[in-house]
Image (cartoon, rainbow, N blue to C red):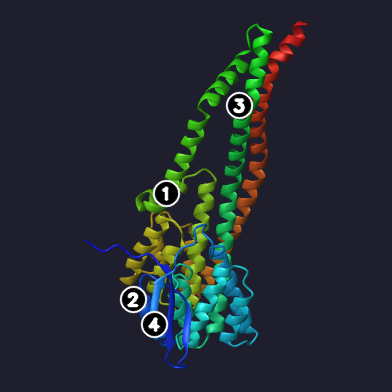
């Protein structure tokens, strides 16, 4: 049976620097004590104490490091280097300017690694949760070719564009969900606290209640008697769904496949994946990474299992001599015709990276247009939904009063 993969943790260390002969203390991310000691030896530090850092009871330590933080960091570092600031000084300035303590610590750890003689790519690879293979490969290519500044700029652009697309798609999906949750909460408050007051008042009136009012009162009685079970079931469903999505690879992949079939939003997710494919491949190809190797990073960057499997299949075909254009055509109508035609022009003209960049720009603009259209379309629909649900509850409660008024 294969050993389970160790999770990364923060280790506190103390050791002697073989160059300065001084005792150094600090923290380093690693999967085991042995790995941390090996990393310290590469820095020229002989560790005499390494132990896993205990987690604060209330989850302290500042905000987590997000992909957005990494995008901003890449842009800040690029700006510093373009201004002629030395690399180590750039890290120091950027690190000190961070509001997130964890991000600041990460940057200063990278600086310490480079300061001790390691390469920048090696320093980034020690933090795989924050710096993916694409990021590290581009930095390594820049260091080897002496064009680190140029490739860091490409990394910054890639990260900014990629995060921009993700935020737009996430925002478009979050808006209707948030409104739905608010509608459910307001409806629950009315059913549990407001409707029972009216129901008691109706009993004193006598007579038969209108059908709509009687129906709402029955729902209210059910909610009052079982509200704990109702909310508990909803909370349990959401928790189980999140855990399955996080821990079950098969469930996560199934949801990714299904997401492409959502009305309207499926098209948004699809175009976002095409844009990320083109943007990532353009960035890798412009950095001089061979096409077959580039597709490793591109597959993961698409963010959807359907595209991941397609790109992996394309990688195998290209390795045997097939062109990128033909391998895209072999994917059973997955790729848009416009994208395939642009890639073909790029391959024939020797400007594949530029054409892929234009493809990415086009589909990023398409995502923007759909997000605007969805937002404009959702607003009246949401208002109508809220009017029917909340207005319906209010109307049901006042119908007996209107009926009595007409009788009098």
The residue that disc 4 covers is 47
Are dots 2 and 3 in contact, CB under 8 Å?
A: no
Task: Of the two numbered discs 1 and 2 on the same chain, state the one appearing first in sequence.
Answer: 2
Measure the C-alpha gap from mark 4 to mark 3: 64 Å
Lateral position of residue 157 relative to residue 344, left or right? right
Q: x%, y% of residue 191? A: 61, 26
Circle 1 Cα neighbour tier, 10 Å, few/some/many (<14 / 14–19 / ≥20): few
Task: Of the two numbered discs 4 and 2 on the same chain, state the one appearing first in sequence.
Answer: 2
Task: Of the two numbered discs 4 and 3 on the same chain, state the one appearing first in sequence.
Answer: 4
How many tags in the picture?
A: 4
* Nearer to me, 80 or 379: 80
Residue 96 image-quadrant placement: bottom right
The residue that disc 3 covers is 191
Measure the C-alpha gap from mark 3 to mark 1: 31 Å
Which marked residue is nearer to the observer: mark 4 or mark 3?
4
Residue farthest right in this picture: 408
Work out which quarter of the rendered image holds the C terminus and state it. top right
Q: Residue at x 48, y 36 (%)?
A: 232
Q: x%, y% of residue 76? A: 62, 76
Q: Tag 4, which secondary structure? A: strand
Which marked residue is nearer to the observer: mark 4 or mark 2?
4
Measure the C-alpha gap from mark 1 to mark 2: 31 Å
Q: x%, y% of residue 317? A: 33, 66
* Nearer to me, 145 or 348: 145
Dot label at residue 34: 2
19 over 358 or under it: above or below: below
Task: Of the two numbered discs 2 and 3 on the same chain, state the one appearing first in sequence.
Answer: 2
Tell me if I can see residue 288 in this picture. Answer: no
Tell me if I can see residue 160 in this picture. Answer: yes
The residue that disc 1 covers is 243
């Amino acid at each position: 049976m294969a050993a389970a993969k160790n999770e990364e943790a923060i280790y506190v260390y103390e050791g002697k620097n073989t160059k300065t002969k001084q005792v150094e203390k600090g923290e380093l991310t690693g999967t085991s004590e042995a790995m941390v000691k090996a990393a310290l030896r590469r820095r020229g530090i002989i560790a005499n104490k390494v132990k896993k850092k205990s987690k604060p009871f209330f989850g302290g330590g500042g905000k987590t490091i997000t992909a957005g933080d990494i995008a901003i960091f890449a842009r800040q570092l690029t700006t510093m280097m373009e201004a002629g600031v030395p690399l180590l000084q750039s890290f120091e300035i950027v690190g000190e300017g961070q509001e997130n303590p964890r991000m600041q610590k990460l940057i200063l750890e990278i600086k310490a690694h480079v300061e001790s003689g390691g390469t920048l790519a090696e320093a980034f690879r020690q933090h795989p949760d924050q710096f993916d293979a694409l990021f590290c490969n581009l930095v390594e290519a820049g260091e080897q070719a002496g064009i680190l500044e140029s490739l860091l700029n490409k990394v910054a652009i890639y990260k900014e564009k990629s995060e921009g697309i993700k935020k737009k798609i996430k925002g478009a999906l979050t808006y209707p969900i948030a409104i739905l949750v608010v509608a459910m909460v307001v409806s629950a408050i009315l059913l549990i606290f407001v409707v029972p007051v009216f129901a008691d008042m109706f009993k004193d009136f006598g007579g038969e209640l209108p059908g709509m009012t009687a129906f709402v009162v029955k729902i209210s009685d059910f909610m009052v008697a079982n509200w704990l079970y109702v909310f508990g079931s909803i909370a349990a469903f959401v928790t189980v769904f999140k855990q399955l999505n996080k821990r079950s690879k098969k469930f996560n992949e199934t949801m990714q496949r299904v997401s492409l079939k959502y009305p309207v939003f499926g098209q948004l997710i699809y175009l976002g994946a095409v844009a990320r494919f083109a943007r990532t491949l353009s960035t890798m190809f412009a950095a001089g990474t061979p096409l077959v190797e580039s597709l490793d990073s591109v597959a993961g960057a698409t963010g959807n299992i359907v595209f991941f499997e397609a790109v992996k299949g394309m990688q195998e075909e290209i390795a045997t001599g097939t062109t990128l254009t033909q391998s895209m055509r072999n994917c059973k109508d997955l790729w848009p015709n416009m994208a395939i035609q642009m890639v073909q022009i790029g391959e024939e003209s020797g400007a594949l990276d530029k054409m892929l960049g234009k493809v990415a720009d086009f589909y990023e603009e398409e995502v923007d247009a759909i997000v605007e259209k969805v937002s404009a379309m959702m607003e009246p629909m949401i208002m109508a939904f809220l009017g029917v649900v909340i207005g319906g509850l209010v109307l049901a409660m006042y119908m007996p009063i209107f009926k009595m008024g007409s009788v009098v």
